[in-house]
Image (spheres, helix red, strand yellow):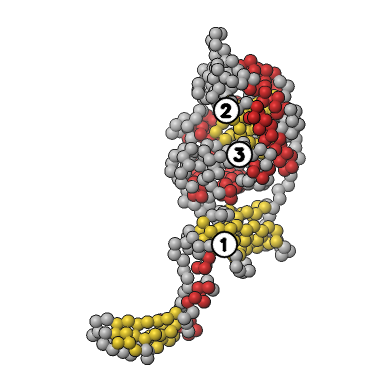
């Protein structure tokens, strides 16, 4: 794909061979694109909804058949020379709703330690099963561009900006990659990062939720045309240029991961030269031109058309079909008949570099339990030790590798004086030389309903020194103060109270003890 950038751009379509207006079979053998220009797209897209049986070629209630059907149509597209991409409109794991159901702060629940993490893992298991079955007849894995959690800069999906913090987004993206790659041995995925448009020329805005170079192969963006005229085309050029420059600086592939003409009709469209104008706009800038591919959406029906098609009615042809044919004939655009040897390229791979990140608690999260698990992932190196410390103390507490989870873990119990405040948790990874290899600090807010302020035990005599006896009060004798409280070795350590004036016949009686060091002991976090 990098070899194409600046020379050609792959045209792609979602459900190119499993949905269409001019096709009779939806089994991977026909396509509106082919019927329009005589070639399939150069890039084919599907979604995890097919694995769930909610989109073709999936079958409702039959997970294995859905997987096998999807593998079959993707193998057919691969055999036709196409590049494959796979998006994910995930269900709401908290409410049971769909991807548009934004209730429930879902990301916080599916991260490690969350009560829906197991449900999310089961969903990832389905994806892994598909990936591991997607092979050629002679057993070679077929590569796929996987694009999860897309358009996160908007707020129409439950993983969108209004419903998750920046750090939560980064961590769920990282978790997804690590689970598929490291736990399920999926190695035929390239990972795409694709916020929605609107970032303009701002690198910082585009990279706000970027999970890191270790987790992303393709940098993309999504943008749809709603009849805005030149402003949209110019905006796409600016944002394509921004993404292309970022990709170049990071050794990544740049792509226009979703585009389309919204509410396209057979007749009555305002921009009849949409495809050629968009191609010309990209070509007008040497950086914007360097998109590896551009993927449009599926022809699901009359109200969802993104590729013109032959209507079969000579009196009412699709009015945008002539422009789409010109777009196909442009030397810049590549369809399946122009994709040659895509899978025969030899490349030099880069060695893996060491990396560390705090999986939980994420930055800016709220600690609500009296004890929370700190989880840290260390990749591509074996540290001498991993430790954490908490704001206000230089003490470094050891973290232990959990072989089941793959995280270095430790339990942290916030001190009473931290409740209601922010706290910085710092993790350091030390190498064998004693040098710090990695360091990260997450700031969290501590809001625990009930937290231990201090504890008194009586295991030894000094433990009782903070207890002062302040007398007994009874209905018969009033108040006296000539008793005492002292340590006793009874039952392995106890507090012995001498109260000489208590009378068993009194209607009421009180003993009063003062915890002299309570404030100091709470301050020490005991």
Disc 2 or disc 3, which is closer to the eye? 2
Q: Which residue is mark 1?
A: 423
Q: Earlier in the sequence, mark 2 or mark 3?
A: 3
Residue sitting at 59 percent across and 30 percent down?
Answer: 224
Q: Which residue is mark 2?
A: 226
Residue sitting at 43 percent across and 33 percent down?
Answer: 61
Residue in front for this viewpoint, 423 or 386: 423
Locate the N terminus by quadrant: top right
The picture places residue 266, in percent across and down from the top left corner, at 55, 17
Q: Given contact means CB atoms under 8 Å apart, are the residues at marks 2 and 3 in contact?
A: no
**Taking the image as drawn, is residue 245 in sight?**
yes
How far apart are the alpha carbons under marks 3 and 1? Answer: 31 Å
Judging from the image, what secondary structure is the residue with disc 3 in?
Answer: loop
Direction from residue 463 to residue 153 in the image, left or right: right
Judging from the image, what secondary structure is the residue with disc 1 in?
Answer: strand
Residue in front for this viewpoint, 123 or 95: 95
Task: State the image quarter where residue 185 is shown.
Answer: top right
Q: Which residue is mark 3?
A: 195
Q: Given contact means CB atoms under 8 Å apart, are the residues at marks 2 and 1 in contact?
A: no
């Amino acid at each position: 794909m990098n070899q194409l950038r600046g020379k050609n751009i792959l045209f792609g379509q979602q459900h190119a061979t499993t949905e269409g207006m001019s096709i009779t079979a939806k089994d991977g053998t026909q396509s509106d694109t082919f019927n329009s220009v005589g070639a399939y797209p150069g890039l084919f897209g599907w979604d995890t909804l097919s694995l769930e049986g909610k989109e073709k070629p999936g079958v409702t209630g039959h997970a294995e058949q859905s997987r096998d059907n999807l593998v079959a149509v993707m193998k057919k597209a691969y055999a036709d020379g196409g590049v494959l991409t796979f998006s994910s409109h995930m269900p709401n794991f908290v409410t049971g709703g769909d991807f548009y159901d934004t209730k429930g702060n879902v990301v916080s629940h599916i991260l490690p330690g969350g009560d829906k993490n197991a449900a999310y893992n089961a969903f990832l298991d389905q994806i892994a099963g598909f990936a591991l079955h997607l092979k050629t007849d002679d057993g070679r894995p077929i590569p796929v561009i996987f694009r999860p959690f897309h358009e996160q800069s908007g707020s129409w999906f439950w993983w969108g900006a209004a419903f998750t913090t920046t750090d939560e987004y980064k961590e769920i993206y990282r978790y997804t990659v690590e689970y598929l790659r490291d736990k399920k041995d999926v190695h035929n995925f390239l990972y795409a990062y694709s916020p929605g448009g609107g970032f303009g020329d701002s690198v910082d805005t585009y990279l706000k939720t970027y999970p890191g170079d270790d987790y992303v192969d393709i940098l993309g963006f999504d943008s749809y045309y709603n009849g805005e005229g030149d402003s949209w085309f110019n905006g796409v050029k600016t944002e394509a240029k921004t993404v292309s420059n970022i990709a170049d600086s990071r050794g990544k592939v740049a792509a226009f991961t979703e585009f389309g003409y919204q509410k396209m009709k057979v007749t009555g469209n305002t921009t009849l030269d949409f495809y050629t104008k968009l191609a010309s706009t990209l070509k007008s800038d040497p950086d914007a031109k360097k998109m590896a591919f551009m993927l449009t959406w599926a022809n699901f029906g009359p109200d969802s058309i993104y590729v013109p098609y032959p209507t079969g009615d000579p009196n009412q042809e699709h009015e945008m079909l002539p422009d789409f044919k010109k777009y196909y004939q442009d030397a810049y655009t590549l369809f399946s008949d122009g994709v040659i040897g895509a899978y025969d390229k030899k490349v030099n791979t880069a060695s893996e570099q060491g990396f560390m990140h705090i999986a939980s608690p994420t930055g800016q999260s709220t600690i609500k339990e009296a004890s929370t698990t700190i989880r840290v992932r260390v990749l591509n190196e074996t540290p001498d030790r991993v430790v954490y410390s908490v704001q206000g103390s230089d003490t470094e507490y050891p973290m232990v590798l959990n072989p089941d989870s793959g995280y270095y873990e430790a339990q942290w119990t916030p001190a009473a004086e931290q409740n209601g405040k922010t706290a910085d948790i710092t993790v350091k990874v030390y190498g064998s030389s004693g040098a710090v290899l990695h360091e990260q600090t997450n700031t969290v807010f501590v809001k625990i309903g009930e937290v231990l302020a201090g504890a008194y035990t009586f295991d030894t005599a000094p433990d009782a020194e903070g207890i002062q006896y302040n007398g007994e009060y009874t209905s018969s004798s009033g108040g006296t103060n000539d008793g005492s409280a002292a340590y006793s070795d009874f039952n392995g350590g106890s507090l012995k109270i001498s109260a000489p004036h208590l009378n068993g016949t009194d209607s009421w009686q009180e003993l009063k003890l003062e915890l002299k060091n309570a404030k100091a002991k709470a301050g020490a976090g005991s």
